[in-house]
Image: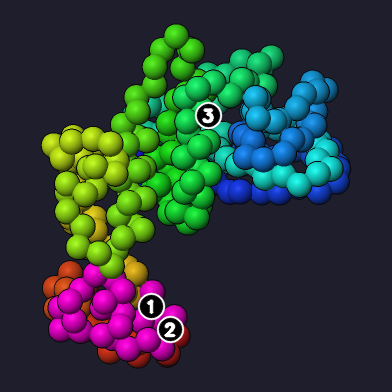
């Protein structure tokens, strides 16, 4: 994962209708197929994004595209500065400009299949999105004979499992099984990429979700506690006080004042 001061990516599912006029932007963009097809021209080089091929649009490249039928594309916006922390992934220097279009190789197809199954989580969770994006960029920038490190994909599966089951009593065994790894490896991945443990991460997410629900809904504190995996109102109150020096009532009062 990138450090806190590293530029981050933006990931979105988009559909297009008709023709988009020639334009450019100051970030790189990777466009991958989910469904349908799109004709695109990048700096005078034409091609198609469909089930077999994606495209990299370098920062500053003039481009236009045309999509006439129902379609969905996974669009990754990547800062022009190096991305990826220690991996220092930089599309402008690692991808050849004359190879804008790239085949959807098996490892990329695997990532797209995962994205199709987990689209809401992938789009809504910055951590899942960045893990997925790092693996995709590694697949694009490494020579095809090299096999990219799949630890980011394993971590993305673990994070998706956690965020989909905050109301459940998750165990390390459960998370590791869904992520396709061992418990030991799971702890190593969290320490390596997030500098935390799975259960510290779960606790933080639960409190974040509880605060969101307290601010944005009229649900009872007991109902919110259950929705984020606490046994009762008392357990949620204790956790908020211990880790955030807050109480549910104080959170609600501050949201109303705001």
* Image quadrant where residue 190 sits: top left
**Residues tagged 3 and 2 counted as in contact (Cβ below 8 A):** no
Circle 1 packing at 10 Å, graded few (<14), some (14-19), many (20+), is many
Specify the segment rendered in magenta: 212-235
The answer to whether residue 30 is above or below residue 178 is above
* Image quadrant where residue 163 sits: bottom left
As drawn, which residue projects farthest toward the top? 145
Mark nearer the N terminus (3 vs 2): 3
**Residues tagged 2 and 1 counted as in contact (Cβ below 8 A):** yes
The residue depicted at 80 percent of the width and 28 percent of the height is: 41
Q: Residue at label 2?
A: 217
Q: Residue at label 1?
A: 213
Residue 236 position in % (x across, y down): 20, 78
Quarter placement of the C terminus: bottom left
Mark 2 → mark 1, Cα distance in angstroms: 5 Å
Residue 234: say if magenta: yes
Q: Residue at label 3?
A: 109
Mark 3 → mark 2, Cα distance in angstroms: 39 Å
């Amino acid at each position: 994962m990138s450090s806190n001061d590293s530029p981050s990516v933006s990931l979105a599912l988009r559909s297009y209708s008709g023709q988009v006029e020639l334009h450019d932007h100051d970030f790189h963009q990777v466009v991958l197929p989910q469904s349908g097809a799109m004709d695109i021209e990048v700096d005078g080089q034409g091609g198609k994004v469909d089930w077999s091929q994606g495209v990299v649009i370098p920062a500053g490249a003039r481009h236009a595209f045309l999509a006439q039928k129902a379609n969905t594309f996974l669009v990754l916006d990547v800062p022009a500065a190096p991305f990826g922390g220690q991996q220092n992934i930089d599309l402008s220097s690692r991808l050849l400009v004359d190879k804008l279009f790239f085949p959807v190789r098996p490892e990329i197809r695997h990532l797209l299949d995962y994205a199709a199954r987990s689209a809401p989580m992938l789009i809504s969770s910055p951590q899942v999105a960045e893990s997925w994006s790092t693996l995709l960029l590694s697949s694009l920038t490494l020579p095809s004979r090299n096999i990219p490190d799949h630890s980011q994909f394993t971590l993305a599966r673990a994070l998706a499992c956690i965020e989909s089951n905050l109301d459940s009593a998750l165990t390390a065994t459960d998370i590791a099984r869904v992520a396709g790894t061992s418990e030991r490896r799971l702890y190593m991945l969290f320490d390596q990429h997030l500098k935390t443990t799975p259960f510290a991460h779960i606790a933080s997410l639960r409190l974040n979700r509880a605060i969101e629900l307290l601010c944005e809904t009229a649900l009872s504190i007991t109902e919110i506690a259950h929705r984020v995996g606490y046994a009762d109102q008392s357990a949620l109150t204790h956790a908020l006080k211990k880790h955030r020096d807050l109480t549910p009532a104080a959170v609600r009062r501050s949201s109303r004042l705001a």
